[in-house]
Image (cartoon, rainbow, N blue to C red):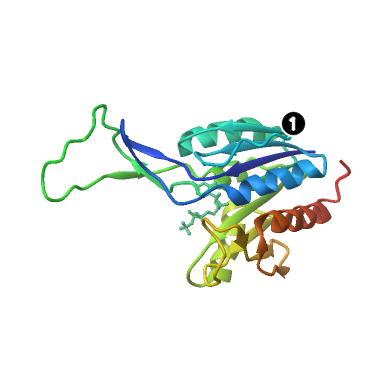
Amino acid sequence: MHVLLTAGPTYEPLDPVRFLGNRSTGKMGYALAEAFAAIGATVTLVSGPVQLPAPTNPLIRTVRVETAEQMYAAAAEAAPSADVWVFAAAVADYRPAHVAAEKIKKSGDTLTLELVKNVDIAATLGHTKRAEQFSVGFALETTNELAHAQDKLRRKGFDLVVLNSLRDAGAGFGHDTNKVTVLAATGQIVNFELQSKADLAHDLVGLIMGRLKLAI
Ligand code: CTP
């Protein structure tokens, strides 16, 4: 079995020394890569810039990228041959319209940046998904969590969406623990208790494998 995983943030350059990014650490995605490798799957881990050590498991091939465009290119290359796609990356939705060749100098009291939309990696690949392929997305919502997550299932062609809770202490960005609710395109909802990202990764892999019923 081959798994494509995206993880970490993307950095969108503004000039040679600055970028737009976010606080994703990549911990959940890297934990999932280890958990898939632990059951014998080969993993293509497309990773944005993170502070984590590269996985040493020989079943995990790590492709390091920086921008959403680069992450899309690497993911699109691996997607056709992957049985499972997991989109755990926190991709920047927008990037600066112009990348300055030289460092932007301070001038007026305000500075307005023009941003353009980035490619939606999960949604774009979702249109190419074959019936036997399985796609899993992540969602982080602050309002109407379930309705928004259900909308994402449809729009991005996910079979499962993992909804991160922001209401619980210790869950989400930067933490070693996470608390999630998983929604299936078929309508089922599974709640997981707060646990380490490593334990949660094993539970999620178990859930995905149960739905796939694929022999490795
Ligand atoms: N995603 C992606 N490419 C993007 C944006 C998001 O692949 N350019 C994936 C994420 O990896 C995640 C899922 O889509 O699995 C949901 O991301 P999210 O940012 O919550 O969705 P958006 O479509 O950007 O919706 P929102 O308006 O809530 O930001």
Image quadrant containing the N terminus: top right
Residue at (67% x, 60% y) in the render = 196
Q: Residue at x 31, y 34 (%)?
A: 17
Residue drawn at point x = 48 percent, y = 68 percent: 142
Count all numbered tags in the image, as a single digit: 1
Q: Is residue 184 above or below residue 53?
A: below
* Location of residue 151 in the rendering, given as x and y in whole percent from the top left corner: 56, 62
**Above or below, comparing residue 169 to residue 159 in the picture:** below
The amino acid on which the numbered mark 1 sits, given as a three-letter code, is Pro
Check the image and name the residue furthest to the right. 215
- Inspect this view and state whether residue 147 appears: yes
Q: Residues within 10 Å of mark 1 (few under 14, many from 20)?
A: few
160 or 127: which is nearer to us?
160
Name the side, left or right, on which 87 lies relative to 1: left
Could you tell me residue 179's position as x and y percent? 63, 66
In the displayed structure, 195 sits above or below 130; it is: below
Residue 90, image x, y percentages: 51, 49
Give residue 45's quadrant in the image: top right
Relative placement, left or right, of 149 versus 92 is right
Outermost residue on the top side: it is: 101
> What kind of element bears circle 1?
loop
Q: Is residue 51 left or right of residue 108?
A: right
Residue furthest left in the image: 108
**Front position in the image: 173 or 176:** 176
Residue with the mark numbered 1: 58
Residue 75 place in picture, x, y as percent = 60, 35
Give the quarter of the figure containing the C terminus.
top right
Visible in this render: residue 87?
Answer: no
Q: Is mark 1 within 8 Å of ligand 1?
A: no
